[in-house]
Image (spheres, rainbow, N blue to C red):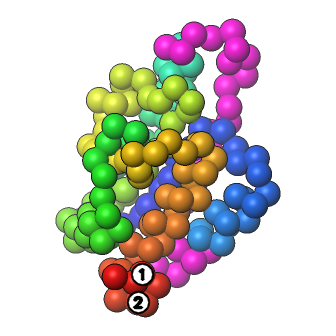
Amino acid sequence: MKIKLIMIGKTDSEYLKSGIYEYERRLSFYIPFLSVVIPDLKNSKNLTEVQQKQKEGDLILNQLNDSDYIVLLDENGKSFSSIEFSDFIEKQMISGSKNLVFIIGGPYGFSNEVYSRAHLKLSLSKMTFSHQMVRLIFIEQLYRAMTIIRGEPYHHQ
C-alpha cells in the first residue's frame, strides 16, 4: 500500500518544513509515502468561498484514482486515539487497499464533489489548528501509527 497526502498551498514556516521533512524521512522506512502540494489559487480574493472550494476541489479530484481510499482531514470528522488510528491504517494495509489518500483542504474546506468522493472524514482534534500546523501534526501521527503497528517503543501507553 502507498500513502499519499494532498495539501492545498505550500508550507511557509521553516520550522514546520523542517519537522515535516523529518517525519517524511522517518516514514520512508515503513511505507511508500508521497506528499502532493497543490499551489494556492491565483486571485483567490476575487472568488467567493464556494468558487474557491470548487476550484480547489477540481484540482484535488485531478490527483485521485478511482481505486483510492480517500480520507479528508475535517474538523467534523471521526476522532481516533493514536492506537485507533494505527488500527485503521493496519486494516487498510491488510484489506489490500492500493492507495490510501489523506487530504488537507483549503481555508474553507472541501467542495461537495470532494466530500462525495471521500470514504472517511477524520478529525485530528476538537481544537482548530492552522492548515500549516495540521500537516506536521498529521505526518507525526502517521509515523506514530507505523511505529505502533511494528511494536516499536516510540509510542508510550
Image: magenta residue range: 25-50
Residue 27 sits inside the magenta stretch: yes
Residue ID at (68%, 18%): 44
Can you give x and y, in whole percent of width and height, for residue 121 in the image? 32, 43
Residue ID at (36%, 22%): 112
Helix, strand or loop at mark 1: loop
Determine the residue located farthest toward the front in the rendered image: 127
Residue 32 sits inside the magenta stretch: yes
Q: Quadrant of the N terminus?
A: bottom left
**What crowding class fits label 2: few (fewer than 14 Cα within 10 Å), some (14-19), or many (20 or more)?**
few
> Badge 1 is on which residue?
155
> Badge 2 is on which residue?
152
Determine the image quadrant of residue 15: bottom right
Can you give x and y, in whole percent of width and height, for residue 26 in the image? 57, 77
Residue ID at (68%, 31%): 40
Res. 30 visible in picture: yes
Residue ID at (55%, 45%): 129
Tell me if 96 is positioned left or right of 31 in this view: left
Can you give x and y, in whole percent of width and height, for residue 63 in the image? 49, 41
Determine the image quadrant of residue 119: top left
Determine the residue located farthest toward the right in the rendered image: 14
Tell me if 20 is positioned left or right of 33 in this view: right
